[in-house]
Image (cartoon, rainbow, N blue to C red):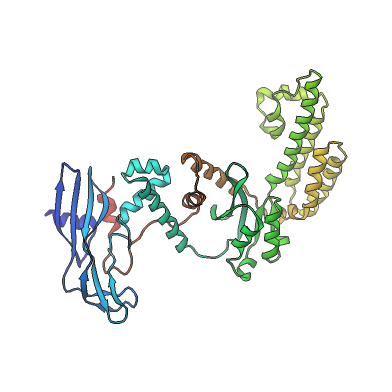
């Protein structure tokens, strides 16, 4: 088999495309492949699909392809241009690359696979691209995925905040709880940003939302009630944020009491912070004896802990009426505990009780969103942080958006790239 035939098979080229020349430069570590179209072929107009003859050819372009063994491979071609009677001069797209790209489809998709596994700097080392080339491929992949995505609003939404940087700079994550993906990343956590997300959908589409899990953040609540039909029955305050309200109150009680005891020279609460914040069954065996002894001292912190633990049984109920009765008993205990932080937390939960009880109708939480938050934090750490908010949002959508990121050949090229053959022949960079 001749080298030209060999590379035609490797590249999966079909008539009218053919390889005319192959050059190996061992000292430069590269293989250059020249591809031409057969003369006399008529091509489809990109606009109207009518056949038209070749008008001329563009300037020669070069595309980076997957390595041939250890040698970098580059495709050279002058793409034909046709003259349509209706739409004028149009350039035919290459079957091996997307329009405007300097990389072949398979090379670009290999870089995308690498970016999924490591940060941009790591992808540079593994693929031989520059930082800007790798980042540009990521940006294009996100834009491609967003263009391919349907605009329907998910049935079950999760809304949560994510810190972008210090000094209270936040992003709002809107997640699809069913698919476990990030739908949208909004700048800041104000009411107007969430209204902007809802505003892209029609009333009928918003009416199709079945439930929305969120924390008790007033701007999120206001935006949802303003724009989502029947929002009062669809908002579900996340159970972990509900427990978090009481857990934070417990920690305030502990800090206040610890400060008071230390002033008297007593250190019984020293080093016990995490014991009080844990669920009872998660306390390590080697500290259970110590914890039991502290609880016997009848401290204020012990009473606050008991109130916190009892609220966890609220979620064991199956019916909202029974859960509401339990909450009323718990609320009486918490508000008569003479512990100001616990009283304040209980009153906050009482004020939001209707949308806490909606959990028993929809049975959703923001656990998926919190899991995505953890993944985003890993992405952030791999990149050593982001100074550019737009880069941060694109990285989130790339890794967590569930988007169709991969480049595909245009259906209007007149030929197609056989990705199966190329994938087998170029198994490694």
Relative to 393, say whether 309 is above or below: above
Please, which residue is most extreme toward the left here? 2
Relative to 281, say whether 156 is above or below: below
Residue drawn 77% across and 54% down?
320
- Residue 423, horizontal then vertical, whole percent: 29, 52
Residue 221 located left or right of residue 370: right
Residue 342 sits in quarter? top right
Quadrant of the rendering where the N terminus is positioned: bottom left
Residue 424 located left or right of residue 230: left
- Residue 344, horizontal then vertical, whole percent: 81, 43
Between residue 62 and residue 291, name the one nearer to us.
Answer: 62
Residue drawn 20% across and 46% down?
30
- Residue 68, horizontal then vertical, whole percent: 22, 47
Residue drawn 19% across and 60% down?
35
Please, which residue is most extreme toward the bottom here? 85
Residue drawn 15% across and 46% down?
25
């Amino acid at each position: 088999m001749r080298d030209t035939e060999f590379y035609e098979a490797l590249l999966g080229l079909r008539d009218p495309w053919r390889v005319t020349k192959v050059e190996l430069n061992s000292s430069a570590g590269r293989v250059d492949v020249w591809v031409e179209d057969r003369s006399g072929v008529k091509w489809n107009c990109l606009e109207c699909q009518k056949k038209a003859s070749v008008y001329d050819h563009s300037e020669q372009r070069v595309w980076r392809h997957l390595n041939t063994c250890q040698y970098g491979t580059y495709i050279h071609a002058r793409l034909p241009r046709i003259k349509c009677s209706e739409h004028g001069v149009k350039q035919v797209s290459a079957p091996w690359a997307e329009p405007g790209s300097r990389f072949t489809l398979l090379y670009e998709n290999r870089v995308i696979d690498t970016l999924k596994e490591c940060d941009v700097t790591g992808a540079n080392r593994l693929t031989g691209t520059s930082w800007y080339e790798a980042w540009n491929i990521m940006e294009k992949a996100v834009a491609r995925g967003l263009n391919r995505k349907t605009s329907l609003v998910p049935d079950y939404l999760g809304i949560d905040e994510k810190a972008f940087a210090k000094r209270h700079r936040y992003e709002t994550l809107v997640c699809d709880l069913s698919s476990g993906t990030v739908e949208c990343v909004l700048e800041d956590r104000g009411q107007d940003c969430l209204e902007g997300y809802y505003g892209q959908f029609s009333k009928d589409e918003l009416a199709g939302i079945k439930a929305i899990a969120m924390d008790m953040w007033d701007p999120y609540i206001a935006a949802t009630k303003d724009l989502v039909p029947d929002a009062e029955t669809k908002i579900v305050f996340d159970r972990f944020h509900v427990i978090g309200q009481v857990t934070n109150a417990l920690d305030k009680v502990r800090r206040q009491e610890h400060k008071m005891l230390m002033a008297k020279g007593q250190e019984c609460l020293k080093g016990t912070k995490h014991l009080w914040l844990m669920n009872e069954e998660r306390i390590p065996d080697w500290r259970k004896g110590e914890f039991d002894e502290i609880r016997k001292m009848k401290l204020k912190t012990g009473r606050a802990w008991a109130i916190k633990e009892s609220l966890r049984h609220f979620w064991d109920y199956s019916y909202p009426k029974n859960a509401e009765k339990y909450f009323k008993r718990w609320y009486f205990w918490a508000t008569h505990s003479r512990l100001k932080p616990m009283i304040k937390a209980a009153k906050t939960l009482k004020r939001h009780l209707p949308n806490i009880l909606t959990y028993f109708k929809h049975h959703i939480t923001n656990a998926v969103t919190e899991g995505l938050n953890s993944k985003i934090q890993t992405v952030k750490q791999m990149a050593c942080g982001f100074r550019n908010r737009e880069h941060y949002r694109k990285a989130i959508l790339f890794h967590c958006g569930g988007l169709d990121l991969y480049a595909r050949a245009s259906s209007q090229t007149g030929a197609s790239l056989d990705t199966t053959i190329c994938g087998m022949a170029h198994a490694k960079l």
